[in-house]
């Protein structure tokens, strides 16, 4: 049985750990609230741009643009959104596992795909496995604004336009609720399904013409899809971390309870033993 | 006078939402003025101020990049960034302008020159718009 002092020191260290996890939980909770608000504020923009793209791409049959056309796939791009830091439960591992499995199923050689990794955890994961990481971005702020990541979105869209990849998929954790996230796969490019999504169509006048508008609109749309996923991913990250830290705090307090019980038992046992020894000693004297 | 609903939205959230009598701005192809009942239209916007006239008073918004979508009853401006004249930080805009000018002097590289020029135009646009507070 562990000595009194050992148990005491374990209790103290567990208490300290639980203080830290508790603090981290509260920090994540407040970050999650802000991330959720950001994702909500972004909603109207996304809806509007989706509406416009759908009605332009669907409304004028002659509107053709390289980003709307599916071409034979020689290389597939995978954009994977993970976090920079760990301690977020299954947040990173579930996305990475999903991507790894998909890549292994779809591709035989490493020449058939490229990876765009957002977040340190994802980057290290793919680099350790010697996979083809074309572009990596670390240090995305907790409350990103569009200007912060416009370089990333631009280069992702450029990769498609320059023929570096022929289709682009995006993987991230979709924020369902504070306790639930869901790994989501989304095809960003080519934008093949926007036409199907349009319900009521408005026929527009184009100033100066449809091609020139699509030229500006489509990259902006693809970029906003990526930005939306990033905001969604951030909200998921914070909620995953909050849940993980809450579990850690709960486990720590359980551990402290059981250790205190052990400590009290050991203390009682020591007292009992001492009394028995004294009584025994006194009896031997008589 | 008949009014038309205008909303300005950016990736960082909605910026403006109101009924106005006339929207005027500069599109890539030239100046545009839109009133209620305009034919449905889409046009890419230049880096410029959007002027919104309502009840004898004009609101100014500095917009950089994006689109204007017109429907008979609603005008939507989808911009990468937009700031109302009263919320523009003049000091910051002026530092941005000075920085862009310095870049232009230092850099000869073509892509960087282009970026610096855009940055400079955005800064100037913000400064001009801020004067209409």
Image (tube, rainbow, N blue to C red):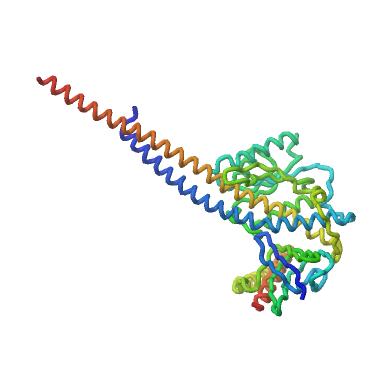
Mark count: 0
The reply, left or right, for residue A275 in relation to residue B89 is left
Spot occupied by residue B118 in the image (x, y as percentages of width and height): 72, 67
Please name the residue shown 75% across and 72% down the image.
B3
Q: Most extreme residue toward the front, as rendered?
A: B1
Please name the residue shown 83% across and 65% down the image.
B41
Please name the residue shown 76% across and 74% down the image.
B22
Q: Quadrant of residue B43?
A: bottom right
Q: Is residue B69 above or below residue B24?
A: above
Spot occupied by residue B112 in the image (x, y as percentages of width and height): 71, 64
Q: Is residue A126 above or below residue A55?
A: above
The reply, left or right, for residue B73 in relation to residue A180 is right
Quarter of the image with the N terminus of chain A in it: top left
Q: Quadrant of residue B119?
A: bottom right
Q: Most extreme residue toward the bottom, as rendered?
A: B56
Q: Nearer the viewer, residue A180 or A84?
A: A180
Q: Is residue B30 visible?
A: yes
Quarter of the image with the C terminus of chain A in it: top left
């Amino acid at each position: 049985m562990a000595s009194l002092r050992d148990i005491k020191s374990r209790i103290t260290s567990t208490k300290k750990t639980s203080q830290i996890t508790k603090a981290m939980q509260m920090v994540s909770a407040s970050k999650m609230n802000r991330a959720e608000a950001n994702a909500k504020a972004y909603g109207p923009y996304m809806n509007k741009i989706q509406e416009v793209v759908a009605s332009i791409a669907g409304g004028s049959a002659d509107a053709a643009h390289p980003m709307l056309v599916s071409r034979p796939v020689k290389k597939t791009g995978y954009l994977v959104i993970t976090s920079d830091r760990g301690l977020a439960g299954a947040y990173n591992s579930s996305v990475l596992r999903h991507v790894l499995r998909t890549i292994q199923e779809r591709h035989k050689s490493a020449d058939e795909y490229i990876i765009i990794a957002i977040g340190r955890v994802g980057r290290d994961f793919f680099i350790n496995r010697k996979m083809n990481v074309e572009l990596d971005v670390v240090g995305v702020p907790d409350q990103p604004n569009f200007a912060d990541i416009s370089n990333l979105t631009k280069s992702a869209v450029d990769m498609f336009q320059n023929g570096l990849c022929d289709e682009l998929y995006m993987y991230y954790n979709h924020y369902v609720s504070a306790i639930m996230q869901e790994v989501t796969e989304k095809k960003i490019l080519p934008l093949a399904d926007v036409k199907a999504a349009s319900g009521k169509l408005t026929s527009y006048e184009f100033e100066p013409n449809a091609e020139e508008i699509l030229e500006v609109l489509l990259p902006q749309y693809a970029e906003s899809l990526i930005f939306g996923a990033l905001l969604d991913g951030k909200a998921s990250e914070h909620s995953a971390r909050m849940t993980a830290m809450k579990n850690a705090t709960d486990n720590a307090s359980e551990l402290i309870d059981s250790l205190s019980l052990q400590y009290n038992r050991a203390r009682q046992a020591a007292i009992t033993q001492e009394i028995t020894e004294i009584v025994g000693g006194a009896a031997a004297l008589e | 006078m008949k009014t038309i609903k205008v909303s300005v939205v950016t990736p960082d959230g909605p910026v403006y939402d109101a009924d106005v009598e006339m929207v005027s701005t500069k599109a890539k192809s030239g100046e545009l003025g839109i009133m209620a009942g305009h034919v449905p239209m889409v046009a890419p916007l230049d880096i410029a101020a959007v002027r919104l006239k309502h009840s004898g008073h004009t609101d100014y918004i500095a917009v950089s990049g994006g689109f204007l979508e017109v429907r008979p009853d609603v005008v939507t401006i989808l911009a990468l960034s937009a700031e109302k004249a009263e919320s523009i930080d003049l000091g910051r805009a002026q530092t941005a302008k000075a920085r862009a000018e310095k870049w232009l002097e230092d850099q000869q590289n073509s892509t960087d020159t282009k970026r610096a020029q855009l940055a400079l135009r955005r800064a100037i646009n913000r400064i001009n718009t801020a004067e209409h507070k």
